Amino acid sequence: MHSPLTPDSTPRRTLGDALAEGTVLLDGGLSNQLEAQGCDLSDALWSARLLSDAPQQIEAAHAAYARAGAQVLITASYQATFEGFARRGIGRARAAELMAASVESARRAGAETGRELWVAASVGPYGAMLADGSEYRGRYGLTVRELERFHRPRVEALAGAGPDVLALETVPDIDEAEALLRAVEGLGVPVWLSYSVDGDRTRAGQPLEEAFALVSGVDQVVAVGVNCCDPADAGRAVETAAATGKPVVVYPNSGEEWDAGGRGWTGKGTFEAGRVREWQRAGARLVGGCCRVGPSDIAALAGRLASSEV
């Protein structure tokens, strides 16, 4: 596993060490930054297609967030799966190379800043591979064991590329969370577990207390919390996650809603950098944004975190 490097290439803190000392800033939504750069993400592979077709765009997007002050860059592997790549005629060996490239791209972008940054390899839910919006519902009709078998090869490939942490993110239900935690066992890479929620429940309707309780006693988990949710739901979820005794991760969407049928965003953005104080008071130590939260929003969060007002 790589350690974050300073300009003199001296290994420094792990992400877990940093979370024990204070708040760490995540990046924002990779897809909206790629679209701002003129990329077409209408393919079923979403941003993962660019790992093969336009890797320079991925690195440029990471660099935009690094310049904005992000300390953790999340890779473009959310929708990268062996099954998804196979549908485009990409074999397993090349698919594994592309997954590793997602980590390397973020690592290069972070190194250019000369600051201490970490790379989080994104592991999206099974529903992301289906590309039909089911990641916002869960309950795919698969057993925990079947979900574990789906996830294990891709987390092995990502872990082998040397990220600082695996981001098990946008998880819609407890069954998939259990499967992911089983899949990462023994890989030697820390993880965070982040649910997509609706109010005080997972997207599948389970109480968050039960969902967060899965990480109790799991040393590999360095943070637990929520992402890809309405900003209004984040504060309560952070309070619930803090009861686990783990550092809390929170990175909500802009507040707009995804229309899976129309494949577009609707509504008005409600993401406010000032909410970071509420999240910190509730126990958050890893904060940022998800879909439609851009570099300017992350820069605003960075300013809040650097301010004595926080």
Image (cartoon, grey):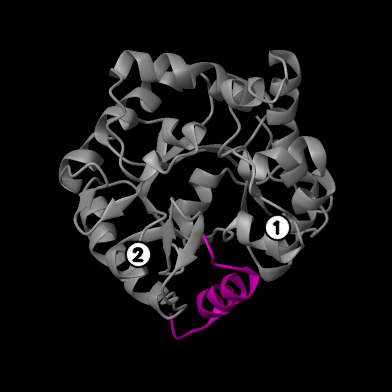
SS for dot 2: loop
Amino acid at circle 1: Leu
Q: Nearer the viewer, residue 140 or 1?
A: 140
Residue at horizontal 70 percent and vertical 22 percent from the top? 95
Give percent across and percent down for residue 22: 47, 61
Res. 17 in view: yes
Mark identifier at residue 34 = 1
Q: Nearer the viewer, residue 275 or 18?
A: 275
Residue at horizontal 79 percent and vertical 60 percent from the top? 113
Is residue 296 highlighted in magenta?
yes
Q: Nearer the viewer, residue 305 or 263?
A: 263
Give percent across and percent down for residue 183: 43, 20
Quarter assignment of residue 213: top left
Is residue 266 highlighted in magenta?
no
Q: Is residue 138 above or below residue 200?
A: above
Read off the residue under disc 2: 230
Magenta range is 288-310
